[in-house]
Image (spheres, rainbow, N blue to C red):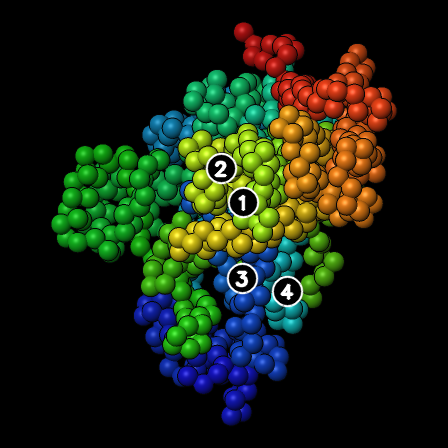
Amino acid sequence: MAPASGRANGETPGARAASLAAAAAAGHFDELLGGESPAAAAGALPCPPWQRFFDTLGREGLGDLNRRTANLQRQVRDNGITYNVYADAHGPQRPWSLDLFPLLVAPESWERIEAGVLQRAALLERIMEDAYGPQQCLSANLLPPALVQGHPGFLRAMRGVRPAAGSWLHVVAFDLARDPQGRWWVVSQRTQAPSGLGYLLENRQIVARLFPEAFRELRVQRLADTYHGFVESLRAMCPSSAEPHIVLLTPGPYNETYFEHAFLARHLGLTLVEGSDLVVRDERLFLKTIEGLEPVHGILKRLDDEFLDPLEMRSDSQLGVPGLLQVIRAGHVLMANAPGSAFLESPGLLGFLPALSRRLLGEELALPSLPTWWCGERVAMQDALPQLARQVVKPTYVGAGSAHGPSLSPGEQAELVRRIEREPDEHTLQSWLPLAQMPTWAHGMAGDRIVPRSFMLRVFAVSSGPGAWRVLPGGLTRIASTNADIASMQRGGSSADTWVLSPGPVDIAALAPPGQLALHPAPRRGVTSRAAENLFWLGRYTERTENAARLAGLLLESLGGEEQASPPLLGWLEQLARFTGLAPADAPPVQQRRAFERTLIDALAKAGAASVGHNLRALRHAASAVRERLSQEHWKLTVRAEQEFVRGCLIVTQDGDHSPVEARRVLESLLGATAAMTGAQADRMMRDDGWRLLWIGRHIERLTFLASVLGRALEAGVVADELGFEAVVALFDGTATFHARYQQRHDMQPLLDLLVLDHDNPRSLASVANALRAGLARLEEGTKETRHALTRQVPEPQLWSMDALCEPGELEALAQRCTDAAYRLSDGLGSRYFTHSADQGHSVGV
């Protein structure tokens, strides 16, 4: 196929695009052509918005789309955008799928969508208020009790409660589909913890940069002002006379959309927390920080209701906060959304909304739902079942996924009918709609093509104050996988940016950069105990990975070097390898050099208790838990280091060669990556108490390793051997400095001077101890009754002297004191800063 140039043979870019585009499937609305397929496809050009889009592509035209696609994919990887159907802390994360072309929504279409979504948001708020209040809709038979009180998501514990600021809902989402005639229909609604607000913003930031001319010329409405108003409305409604503290509650790093949670928290200026970060005291909610308990006034919830409070809901939940519902009932915390909205998500409710709108709002629904029948009503079931071949069967409450009637065989349809008749309440039928199809860019063996794919649009309404709503001018477009008509990210689908076109000029100031949404700078908040603990271990695992890589490299060099290492040196290195876990318990003795070497190489990337690969995975896991605190560069370094190390080890071992030279090259590359990580930690992070704990963790690990190396070297007598002496210096990363300062001397005084007493050498015991003491002293500044209790546990280098350390046994004793201090410090820091178990009053009233 000829290259997709911009104006080949006088063709306009729009005409060229039409020649590359396949027609949408028959009976589907074709977004590119603006009409139903196939009638719209007969020699038609793209509709005006798409023509304008292609006209802005520049001199290269469509021929530049492959480069833009590569840039898009690289940006997704570099930003670390992930979506995991089943997140695995030890496995690769699935990159977010984003298509190149945006969905273009014309101003007149958006006007109808916006009006309908605003009306529906107000209606859902009124239904929620009535369901937990007077229940007039139930009394008037406008709603069946089975869809409200019979729904497992209806929380009787919230009956009669007035939530903070009187608002139940603060963010709602509606999934929309377009029929063959171009009309929009509501397919479903999400109220518990709607996902997508973060992903759609990332989509916008990536795609808008790839098509800046089109973004400007098409007058795309900006998103940032709506996010800004949402955050300000939450702040204004929080039950606090002082500066409110709002947190974003996430299930944690294992959740499929955790990236979005971290991204939103950073973008909106909220504290990202898990349930274990929060505690209830005297009907009030507090955040556990390393400085103590800090009040929390608002929660943006990304957790399903059933997991919120193990005392009143699922008792096996480890994601929630015991006593949280009591705090909400007392009106001491704003939760967006208030617990108990799950019944609003039932598809069975959709068929009752027209009558509810007339009763509660005095209006007809402006944006209709797809025809929906709840089978709990016998008449509705009898009307809908004969049309099962054109219906989608959905669970009324919670349970298995939908059944797609058109794809079922007659036998399967008959079995489904019998199941529905046995359990009618459990099933809801909805008309099947052939989804509209939008253009996507495809590059492959068959050449460059524009391929139509089915999509659904998720639109969000967010609170702008009590009883007031605003529709986000955009949305999350979900695209079905190839040849599918179900738009689901969990089924291999993709996403697209959503451009809402404006009929007039757009205020370009509304596009604020990430992290600059607040009108006033947020006060400095304490570091959560969980974040502090993960930062502490991030520092430890960074140092531990580097130490393990350096030790493994030195061991491989000593086993296969030109000069045969002495038995004491090899015995000492073997002892260190077994002590640190580099050598598995079943490894042969080092005297069997080749067998020991192969075992060591084979274990580098395996999931052993302390292999280099294990340390790297633990490092990445700790980093993922505090991702909102790390720069993009830091995160990318972490992910790339693990991937390249695992890949390198696989290459070394897969052919059975186990080349020590290649293995050392992989380890050297990892040492470069850990040095870059250390630089990112030093130069790219806010130097608060969380950073100090990272620093302390790294130096505790360094003190433990170096003191152990020195103590075991003295015990084994390897410093008396020239190669052993050099090996000790190498593990302290001091070879270049030692040789420049002392040339070829191999006696104890220069060794003690550089590796123990030199305060300017960042890897001497004195320098590490001083760094630890300084970091601990700063951390303990606010502690009065135990002032500097942890600092005093570290041996004081000012008391060390060359003469004293040259006395028999003194150096060994100092190394042991340093090792013991490091272990005590780790325990002391954990009990003081990472747990809050002291009883400070009753959590739950009687």
- Taking 465 as reference, is 559 left or right? left
Name which residue type carries label 3: Gln
Are dots 2 and 3 in contact, CB under 8 Å?
no
- Taking 335 as reference, is 24 left or right? left
Q: Which residue sits at x=55%, y=83%?
A: 6
Name which residue type carries label 1: Leu
Q: Which residue is mark 3?
A: 73
Camera-near label (4 vs 3) is 3
Secondary structure at numbered mark 2 = loop
Which of the two discs, 4 and 2, labels the residue nearer the N terminus?
Answer: 4
Q: Which residue is mark 1?
A: 559
Q: Mark 4 to mark 2: distance in Å?
A: 57 Å
Q: Residues within 10 Å of mark 2 (few under 14, many from 20)?
A: some
Q: Which residue is mark 2?
A: 590
- Identify which residue, 593 or 102, lies in the foreground: 593
Secondary structure at numbered mark 4 = helix
Q: Which residue sits at x=38%, y=76%?
A: 446
Q: Does residue 213 appear anywhere in the picture?
A: yes
Camera-near label (3 vs 1) is 1
- Identify which residue, 792 or 344, lies in the foreground: 792
Which of the two discs, 3 and 1, labels the residue nearer the N terminus?
Answer: 3
Q: Which residue is mark 4?
A: 209
Residue 590, placed above or below residue 637: above
Task: Please identify the residue farthest to the bottom as the structure is shown.
Answer: 9
Query: Residue 282 falls in which quadrant of the image?
Result: top right
Q: Which residue sits at x=39%, y=53%?
A: 656
